[in-house]
Image (tube, rainbow, N blue to C red):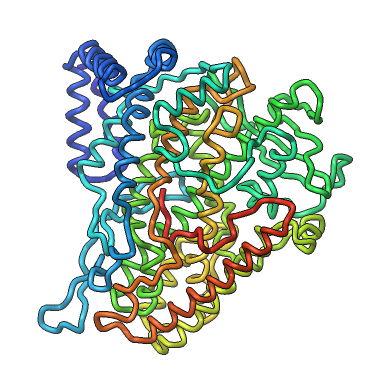
Amino acid sequence: PGRVPETLPTLIHLSHYHHPIMVLLNIAACFLKIFGCHCCLKWRLTRLVEDMLNGEERNFSDETKRILEEEISQDSYTLIVTLTGPGIFIQANKNPPTIEDIKASAVDCGWKKDKRDDSKWLRVRVREFIYKISKRFRIILLGEDDLSGSQFTLKQRLAQEVLKADFVFPMNDLDYICKDKEVTKRVMDEMDLAEGKAMPTSYNTDFNMETDESFSRIFFYGIGCVLLEKQETVSDSEYGPIEVDMPLHTLPVRKLYRALGARIHFSKDQKVTAIFDYEQGKLFQPGEEGWDNAKLLAKVTCFALTTAQEHLVWAHWLVSNNATREMCLNLTPTHPIRRLLTIFTFRSNVVNAEAFDLLMPKLSILHRTCAFSIEGMNSIFDSAFTNSTIFKPFPEKTYNSAVQELIDAGKLPYATQFSEYYELIRKFVKSWLKKADDRASDAEAKAFYNAMKATTKGQSYELPEFGDDALVNLCTTIMFTVTAYHELIGHVVDYTNGPGKAGFRITKNDPSEIDLQSLLLTGVISASTSKRMPMLMSPFKNFFGVEGAPAWERDLWDGFVKELEKQSKKVQAENAKADFEWKYGDPSRFECSVSV
């Protein structure tokens, strides 16, 4: 009984879904902890892990089994998640969503037809789940979706709650590193955490990230290029005019892991010249002792930062989640703006709800995988919110003169090809809203826009007042972000398929590679991105211009796809002539909406 005051409020607080059932379940969990047998539970988990390791369906080599039993089995969470997760994703990918799932008649989230007048819609309450990240940043999720009729079910929520319950799966950090990279790769392969199995297959080639040239590629032709615009002035450093500065060293980390944070210097010809380690307060140059460790620090810092900021907060929460929610709540299913955005928000409510539970809360898989305390994680999320410029039209982004020289010389396709793609969308959106006529500025349109504008309050770039151009830019930015931008920051298999690539943390004991526990859990996160949405350049014959929708929808969509096909061929021709590899700007690779 003496443990009730401490345990009960904590368990209720952990239930971020503010729903009576979840509170009652956590109260039940509290009493299980008070009156139950912890040793019995631990024994059952141990037996479960042993059965999974020795099951007939497993074909582990003796070496893999030894490593898992001796080094990883200390944490039941890691073994259970990494032994079951890959199979779940492989099975899910056998039946992915298709364009046939997107039907005009199935669009009704938040509304129902008026029985007395079939031409009118009535609002329907959609359950919202609210999670407060900080005083300035909160996430509001809808529990159901358009089209698929899917919901983030109670069963799914219960499973996530169990995985985050510290009584069942306490945080148990490990720092074991297998020195033989081939052995590490074999362990991951036998656990199906490899490309073409649970993890998606990369379309990049020779992206080892270990040579200085391949390292530099991350920041000019990989996820790191999103950080270049943040350097507002040209560096006057002797190490070159271009810097990528990531000062994360003040964020608290757990005891086995070192702080992140690095500043990278590049010459004008895109070659890395030096890396400053914030925690050590020391600059490293190529060829010096500690250079490889400094590169790993920079890669991990970049990957952790862009995953938290550009991928999760900007693409998923601020754009995809907010746009899908406000579309459902403010636009009737037949409204032209909702018709425009439906393809780009397909399954997004459920995807974002799943992503939230998987990656955001305390004791989530991301929290266990990275080095940060929960306070450190939430600090990154809060900073990502306030620093957000995601709603600024992409072609209006500015770069310092050194980066602009690269753009003008065709050495930064992130800026050029993405701007071209953005303008193609903007042209399409203008044509669509012109056809919509007065409905593009009616009460529903303004309610949707103003609701989105309210979500940007407190960010570095806030949406302007409603107007024709403002609405065009908002719709264009939503469509751009969930397709091209998400492809760049979400295609992460290259960064997660080996111990010398990137990852989320570095151990104090050995800062030369990613530890196996983190590598396996990162592999599961990477595998969760393998479930693809329908491809953007599809006809969507069951949606546009059918079941009472105007015929001009079909004409405009088909015309848009033709323009995308032209852009795809242009991008492929440019890439074939280039002396670098950049494949993220090809519209033929884009999905129509976000996956995890």
Residue plotted at (66% across, 51% down): 581
Residue at far right of view: 238
Is 244 on the left or on the right of 533, as rendered?
right
Question: Residue 291, how many percent across, how many down?
Answer: 75, 26
User: Residue at 37% of width from left, 40% of height from top?
Assistant: 358
Q: Is residue 22 left or right of residue 531?
A: left
**Residue drawn at x 40%, y 57% as measured from the top left:** 321
Total numbered labels: 0
Give residue 512's quadrant in the image: top right
Residue occupying image coordinates x 42% and y 60%: 593
| Residue 308, position as x, y percentages in the image | 52, 43
Residue 484 visible in image: yes
- Extreme left residue here? 116
**Location of residue 286 in the rendering, given as x and y in whole percent from the top left corner:** 80, 30
Q: Is residue 152 above or below residue 476?
A: above
On the question of residue 466 being in view, the answer is: no
Which part of the image, by quadrant, shows the N terminus? top left
Query: Would you place residue 93 above or below residue 334 in this image?
Result: above
Left or right: 205, with 317 as reference point:
right
Residue 397 appears in which quarter of the rendering? bottom right
